[in-house]
Structures are given as C-alpha cells and as structure tokens.
Image (tube, rainbow, N blue to C red):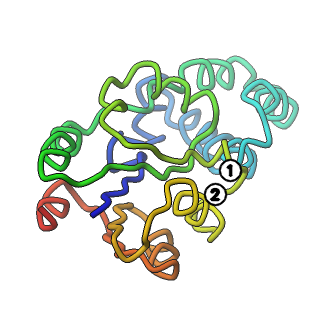
Amino acid sequence: MNFIFDFGNVLVDFKPVEYLSKLFTDKSVVEKMHNLIFKSPEWLIMDQGQLTHNEAVKIFCTREPDYQAQIHITMKNANGILSRINETIELLPKIRDFGYRLYYLSNMQRELRDYLLDKHEYIHLFNGGIFSCDVNSIKPSPEIYRHLINKYNLIPEECIFFDDVEENISAAEKEGMKGVLFIDAKCVLNYL
C-alpha cells in the first residue's frame, strides 16, 4: 500500500492570515497582503513553476507600489508559513514500520520546496514524491497525479491520498486512488 500526502495543512500548516498576523499588527495590511499575494493568480503560477519568487515580487510591487515594504517582508519571510504538523509527521515512521511506502504530492513553489527539502528532516522518510513546480502542473489537474503514478510505477488502486481540499481528493479518485479528506492525523490512523 502507498500512502500519499499533500503538504499544506496536512504535514505543514499553510495558514496565510495567521502568518501575516505575526508580521503585521494592522489588520488592513494583513487583509491587503492576503488578497494581493496569497489569493493572486501569481501564487498559483509560482506553484506551477512558471514564475519565480523575484518575478512575483516585482509584479506585486508594480500592482501595489504603496505596499512595497510589506510585500518584501511577506515574501522574504514566506518560509515562516510552513510550520510542522507534528501529529501527522509522527505517523510517518509508523506507516513505514507497517511496510507501507510513503509519497508526497503537493502544490508548492520552488522557494518553499527548497526550504522543505533543506529544513524538514522527515523528508528522508518518503520513498519519493512530486512538487507541482517541478512538473508545471498543479492539483487538481489530472496530469500531476499521473506524473506521480508514472514516475514511481504506482498502481492507483494501491494508493491512499490524503489532502485537505475536496476537489483534490475527487481528482485523485478519478485517477483510481482512494482519496481521504484530511481533517487531522486521526483520519490517517484509520488506514493503519
């Protein structure tokens, strides 16, 4: 059996408003940065690997020149948005002990991917995985699921995919995987 995990809100927190609230006390700035950066089409284009961090900063600064300082602070510290969800991470060695294989499938831009690979030591527990920026495709596009299946010669019916977004779960199921909407680590325990 193959256990496949998303990163955001499954293995690491991805809560932009909470992250921004730590950077800025002014709620209007928090809202502005959330909408300008995290809700922007550019954020998804970065996840697709088709726009760099620096290119996105230039676009955001052109779009909102009065907020250049806040944009730079937000983007410079973006790694701070990825804090570990220990309850899930602590299950990874147990899954391996049961003889199951571990993979990841996550929408992620290059800078955040590099940070995860460098600073999150549990990555070595995975047999492999796909970050969207490496294949220029994001969930829920069928192509990203097929990349994972083909790269590791996985049998979809032998895969359980955990994600916090219903649309991504549905897309995985269309590719033959068992999809599980991630609420907390307990939902993983149901499959051990």
Where is mark 1, residue-wise?
44
What is the x, y in percent for residue 157? 37, 77
The disc placed on residue 138 is: 2
Which residue is drawn at the image coordinates 47% and 73% (left, top)? 172
Quadrant including the N terminus:
bottom left
Question: Residue type at mark 1?
Answer: Leu
Q: Is 41 on the left or on the right of 95, as rendered?
A: right
Horizontally, residue 188 falls left or right of residue 75, namely: left
Image quadrant assignment for residue 116: top left
Sequence-first disc among 2 and 1: 1
Report the residue at 66% width, 43% height from top.
Answer: 133
- Asked if residue 159 is positioned above or below residue 21 in the image, the reply reads below
> Alpha carbon of mark 2 to alpha carbon of mark 1: how far?
8 Å
Disc 1, SS: helix
Residue lying at the far front in this picture: please name it: 153
Q: Which quadrant would residue 146 be assigned to in this image?
A: bottom right
- Percent position (x, y) of residue 126? 35, 40
